[in-house]
Image (cartoon, rainbow, N blue to C red):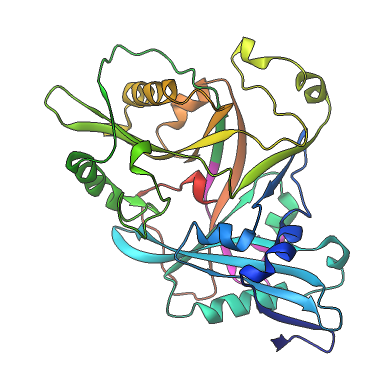
Amino acid sequence: MSSLNSRYEYSLATSNDGPDLLRLYECDESSGNISVMYTRRPNPYESLLREGDKVIFPIMRVKETQELCGGGCCVIRKAYVNGQRRITGYLTGLKIMPKFRRRVPYIQELYQELFALTKGEVDLFYTTILAENVVFQRLLEKKRKNMPVYQFLHDYTVYCFLPRLPKTSLDLALEQGVSREVIEFYEQRLPHLNLSPYSLIESSSYPRLDSSNIYSLKDAAGRVVAACGLVDQKHYKQYIVTKYSGALNLLSHLPLTWIGYPNLPKVGQVINYASIAMLCVDNDDRDLACSLMSKVFAQHNNYDFFMLGLVGNHPLNQLFETLKHIKYPSKLYTVHNDPSHLHLDERLIHLEVSLL
């Protein structure tokens, strides 16, 4: 334990802190017409470990009572940065329990501890902030003493949609599983995508994909032209609707699938979804993307909807904007405390929604 002052102290969380971390995760929910609680049941520490090689999670407690005040996490994982294999740190779970928010001014110390513990290990830090969280954005974007610099990169949109994609004239057979051709397809493309995983099959590659949930399309010459995976994380990471307001309170009781939108989940219910992972298609071709996902969705009709995240300049945004969808916009930042930090080059950013 390290002392912040006479009343508070910090330590590094472990799996044994799971119950307290869960209370920290569930002390907030998104605002707006749909209030959603993002959580990691049953144990946030173990959940985060599933998405990286290492988790560093400093937490603050009241010395006398050991009551948890807050914390912030860095998930360390391998990814391509500027065409090279690097170690990245995703900053997430920065939270203060409501009763301490005006009483514990130690976020700076948490950041200093995170950077000290990862010095020489992490090449690039990044994070996302919901677009609706304007107050938090302004707080972190403003340059402050002993606080890292938040450098805005791109808007990032999470699309929630039904498996109803535009029809295409393509008639390519869907293949399931990992083949040499699929591995080569990704090996040729991933280095050209910033923040993309190293590999499809390495044990340390994230997201971890079961080979049976990897799908591809081949052209007439037998060449892979599109591929993606499907990830179901509900057993360790959940989204739960806590409240609807306004018109959505009425719409939540109606069958919206009749008009092409996903039905709104019931209040208190874990949202039944799957994420599209590692979507790559030749030349970001819209018809190839439609053909691939339509065939994948036909084999997975047990989900209420699917999720996919894309940065603002991704060519496939044009496709998903035409679908009937619900979307959650965020902002993507690099975070650094060193003027000579690593900068991302012009490569397209490929950030997996399943790793947020």
Q: How many numbered marks does the figure carry? A: 0
Q: Nearer the viewer, residue 30 or 333?
A: 30
Residue 200 image offset from top left, x and y in percent: 31, 49
Residue 317 versus residue 196 in the image, above or below: above
Residue 351: say if magenta.
no
The quarter of the picture where residue 298 lies is top left
Residue 16 image offset from top left, x and y in percent: 66, 70
Quarter that holds the N terminus: bottom right
Query: In the figure, is residue 197 to the left or right of 327?
Result: left
Span of residues in magenta: 139-156
Residue 325 image offset from top left, x and y in percent: 58, 25
Q: Residue at 69% across / 14% down in the picture?
A: 255
Toward the left, the furthest residue is 221
Query: In the figure, is residue 268 to the left or right of 53?
Result: right
- Regarding residue 143, the answer to whether it shows in the image is no
Query: In the figure, is residue 308 to the left or right of 45?
Result: left
Q: Residue at 37% across / 22% down in the picture?
A: 295
Q: Residue at 75% across / 68% down in the picture?
A: 70
Residue 144: say if magenta.
yes
Q: Residue at 53% across / 80% down in the picture?
A: 117
The quarter of the picture where residue 229 lies is top left
Residue 346 versus residue 335 in the image, above or below: above
Residue 144 image offset from top left, x and y in percent: 68, 72
Q: Nearer the viewer, residue 88 or 199?
A: 199
- Regarding residue 355, the answer to whether it shows in the image is yes
Q: Nearer the viewer, residue 31 or 78?
A: 78
